[in-house]
Image (cartoon, rainbow, N blue to C red):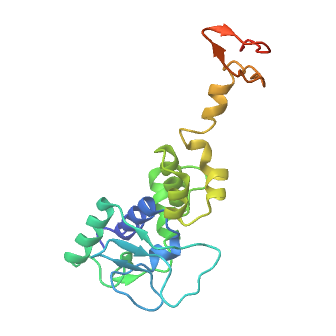
Amino acid sequence: MKRPLRHLARFILIGQYTGTRAGAIASASPDPAIGRSYVDLDRGVFYRLAQGKAATNKRQPPVPLPKRLLAHLRRWKRLKLIARHFVEFNGVGVLSVKTAFKRAVKLAGLSGKVTPHTLRHTAATWLMQAGVDPWEAAGYLGMSVETLLRVYGHHHPDYMKNAVEGITRKPKREQSNVVTVGFSEGKKLKGDKPAQ
């Protein structure tokens, strides 16, 4: 085998640009089938929840694919670089890329806990750094807005923006509750108090 990590490169592209969980990436197919997640290459939509599988708390909503990633997926199918799954090893779909991922991490000289799930963290961080609306980003990633903001919100350019601007802002002066009734030819009427 000349390129033993080619399947991992495909896995990484899909994971990085969709923030999808590893299992859904591994089962992703250009053909709909029970037990597989499905990528509609015509519409450009990734149906992450495997057909026939019940939804769980780990949200896996359909997601539109970025044009750059969709072009790769279509090319892999068109050139017959894949058969039934987007991530295949020796022509067979994989259940996990943990072994290949560990090897790639070692070859790259990375330290710390770098796992396939790291791609999901990176995708969320990139979306926040790009200033994407948290509601849209959470929907794209398949997580709650609360989780997104709690874990990744500090990467958003608007993080603490109001606090930063407010710390040096002079406090607003109290508004007078007195209402001026009116003036007659520029003269003050009895009972009027000057506005502050």
Q: Residue furthest top?
A: 187
**Image vertical order of residue 125 relative to residue 27, above or below:** above
Left or right: residue 175 versus residue 81 is: right
Question: Is residue 107 visible to us here?
Answer: yes
Q: Quadrant of residue 80?
A: bottom left
Front in this rendered view, residue 142 or 74: 142
Q: Residue at x 53, y 50 (%)?
A: 125
Q: Position of residue 14 (x, y in %)?
A: 40, 65
Q: Residue at x 60, y 9 (%)?
A: 185
**Image vertical order of residue 83 relative to residue 18, above or below:** below
Left or right: residue 182 versus residue 137 is: right
Front in this rendered view, residue 85 or 42: 42
Question: Is residue 5 visible to us here?
Answer: no
How many badges with numbers are in the image? 0
Q: Residue at x 23, y 70 (%)?
A: 75
Quarter of the image where the N terminus is located: bottom left
Q: Position of residue 91 (x, y in %)?
A: 33, 82
Q: Position of residue 52 (x, y in %)?
A: 51, 91
Left or right: residue 13 versus residue 42 is: right
